[in-house]
Image: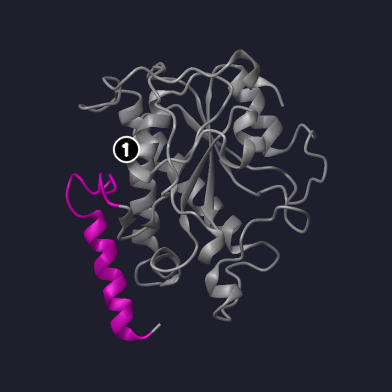
């Protein structure tokens, strides 16, 4: 990256971190200066179900158990189009950043008093989706016990990607955490692509943004990467706190949440 672009990226990330309102994305904008385009798909749900302030939150890194098999995640624009080396041999760049964000969110959330933990599968390739060690199996068990499950993703680059936003879990009426994350990142329709495997198992999927400019260069640039990662983690954790009413102005006064049909909990 040339020095002028590097300086511009560093300034951009610094602006995203500056000030008390930095954790929240621009409320009405379809493009965020750090995470890029937000989902333009119509959000057909509202999250109003309240959760206890100490609800156990489980954070997963998307594709952590599907490397080298179907569904490994996007390689990102830098690798696929621009000839860059992968961030880590043997895994997609999406998984690399999913892991980095998930760990940063849990570290910050624990320091802020949230009941939050990270699960990482012991193997990078688990072909059987029903294996008890997969993200899906561990996430479903946590959701069945009443916890909140958030799986971190980065969306595809170029026309295949949609943009940042939350795809909510489909096992219960949508929660105030779902609503808060959608306010911070954007929202997808509840039945996106007919209902994805994670949401059908009680796992909310958060697309941080498309793995392309401006987000990917901000993360890859050594001058801005740490600040970009911190800004993303701050936004996620602040949204969790607002969804749990652990901060003034938390979610909860919106319109009545849309209710799912009883059959939606099925696979």
Residue name at image x 42 percent, y 37 percent:
43
**In the orientation shown, which residue stands out farthest toward the right?**
128
Residue name at image x 75 percent, y 48 percent:
123
Evaluate whether residue 187 shows in this view. yes
Q: Is the residue marked by circle 1 packed among few (<14), some (14-19), or many (20+) residues within 10 Å?
A: many
In the picture of the structure, the residue carrying the numbered disc 1 is 238
Q: Position of residue 92 (x, y in %)?
A: 64, 62
In the rendered image, residue 126 lying in the magenta stretch gets the answer: no
Q: Position of residue 172 (x, y in %)?
A: 54, 19
Q: Is residue 226 left or right of residue 203?
A: left
* Placement of the N terminus among the 4 image quadrants: bottom left
Q: Quadrant of residue 193?
A: top right
Local secondary structure at mark 1: helix
**In the orientation shown, which residue stands out farthest toward the top?**
262
Residue name at image x 40 percent, y 19 percent:
257
Total marks shown come to: 1
Identify which residue, 224 or 41, lies in the foreground: 41
Q: Is residue 78 left or right of residue 217?
A: right
Image height check: is 216 above or below 231?
A: below
Residue name at image x 47 percent, y 31 percent:
116
Q: Position of residue 57 (x, y in %)?
A: 49, 28
Q: Quadrant of residue 181?
A: top left
Q: Quadrant of residue 242?
A: top left
Magenta range: 2-29
């Amino acid at each position: 990256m040339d020095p002028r672009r590097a300086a511009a990226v560093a300034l951009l990330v610094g602006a995203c971190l500056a000030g008390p309102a930095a954790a929240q994305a621009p409320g009405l904008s379809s493009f965020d200066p750090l995470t890029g385009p937000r989902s333009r798909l119509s959000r057909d749900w509202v999250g109003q179900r309240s959760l206890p302030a100490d609800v156990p939150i489980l954070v997963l890194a998307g594709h952590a158990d599907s490397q080298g098999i179907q569904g490994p995640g996007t390689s990102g624009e830098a690798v696929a189009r621009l000839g860059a080396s992968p961030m880590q041999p043997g895994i997609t760049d999406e998984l690399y950043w999913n892991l980095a964000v998930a760990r940063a969110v849990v570290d910050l959330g624990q320091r802020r008093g949230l009941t939050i933990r990270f699960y990482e599968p012991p193997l990078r390739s688990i072909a059987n989706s029903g294996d008890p060690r997969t993200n899906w199996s561990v996430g479903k068990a946590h959701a069945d016990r009443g916890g909140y499950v958030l799986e971190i993703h980065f969306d595809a680059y170029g026309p295949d990607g949609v943009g940042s936003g939350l795809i909510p879990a489909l096992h219960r009426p949508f929660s105030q955490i779902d609503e808060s994350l959608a306010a911070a990142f954007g929202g997808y329709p509840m039945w996106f692509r007919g209902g994805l495997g994670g949401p059908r198992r009680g796992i909310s999927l958060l697309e941080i943004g498309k793995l392309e400019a401006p987000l990917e260069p901000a993360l890859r640039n050594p001058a801005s990467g740490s600040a970009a990662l911190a800004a993303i983690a701050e936004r996620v954790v602040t949204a969790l706190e607002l969804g749990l009413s652990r901060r003034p102005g938390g979610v909860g006064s919106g319109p009545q949440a849309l209710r799912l049909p009883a059959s939606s909990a099925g696979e």
